[in-house]
Image: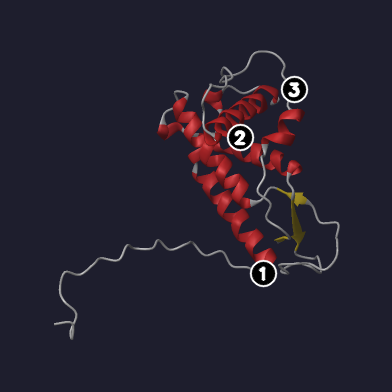
Amino acid sequence: MISMESSNSENINNNSNANLSASSSSPFAAVPPTGSSSRYENQKRRDWNTFGQYLKNHRPPLSLSRCSGAHVLEFLRYLDQFGKTKVHNQMCPFYGLPNPPAPCPCPLRQAWGSLDALIGRLRAAFEENGGKPEANPFGARAVRLYLREVRDMQAKARGISYEKKKRKRPQQSSMLPTPGAI
């Protein structure tokens, strides 16, 4: 099992882009930046280009059409080396502690929230770049299960259970007078 010391939101591409060299032709054209894109759109473009570099540098090189959920999982595991979230192993004395009192040699990994957001952006980018929704490797069952497993392991490791936020329902105003108001 794994424990997470702190959940740092991060730009996954900052470190991984430096390690993906730009060599021969890309499996899909790099999406150029546009003048007035939102922060989300810019991040989505960088994520898409990073994944394209990953496919290009894969041995053997992969085309996007041959990419599967297994390749997406390989990419997510590759990104773990650039993580900034301390993740305690089950054998660590700090496993299950939300705020460990001292440092330990446990690895740094990607936080679940960062991976979840990344997959969401890549799912959207895949379809925006001509991919069919039913063939989207970022929406594969294996990817969803992996994200759920990472979330649950990191939550247990911190001693915090993850509970899905409940949607607040808007209160309906009543047209009927309240008793005693007449």
Q: CA distance from mark 1 to mark 3?
A: 39 Å
Q: Nearer the viewer, residue 143 or 87?
A: 87
Label 2, residues with CA under 10 Å away: few <14, some 14-19, many ≥20: some
First in sequence: mark 1 vs mark 3: 3
Report whether 44 appears left or right of 128. right
At x 71%, y 69%, the residue is 96
Residue 156 in percent (x, y) is at 65, 65
Label 1, residues with CA under 10 Å away: few <14, some 14-19, many ≥20: some
The local secondary structure at tag 3 comes to loop
Picture layout, residue 18 above or below residue 84: above
Q: Nearer the viewer, residue 60 or 84?
A: 84
First in sequence: mark 2 vs mark 1: 2
First in sequence: mark 3 vs mark 2: 3
Q: Check disc 3 and report the residue beneath it.
A: 21
Picture layout, residue 159 above or below residue 128: below
Q: Amino acid at mark 1?
A: Gly
Q: Amino acid at mark 2?
A: His
At x 55%, y 35%, the residue is 39
Q: Could you say which quadrant of the image residue 20 lies in?
A: top right
The local secondary structure at tag 2 comes to helix
Label 3, residues with CA under 10 Å away: few <14, some 14-19, many ≥20: few
Residue 75 in percent (x, y) is at 65, 36
Q: CA distance from mark 2 to mark 1?
A: 31 Å
Q: Nearer the viewer, residue 90 or 128?
A: 128
At x 68%, y 35%, the residue is 13
Mark sitting on residue 71: 2
Mark sitting on residue 159: 1
Judge depth for marks 2 and 1 and give the one in front: 1
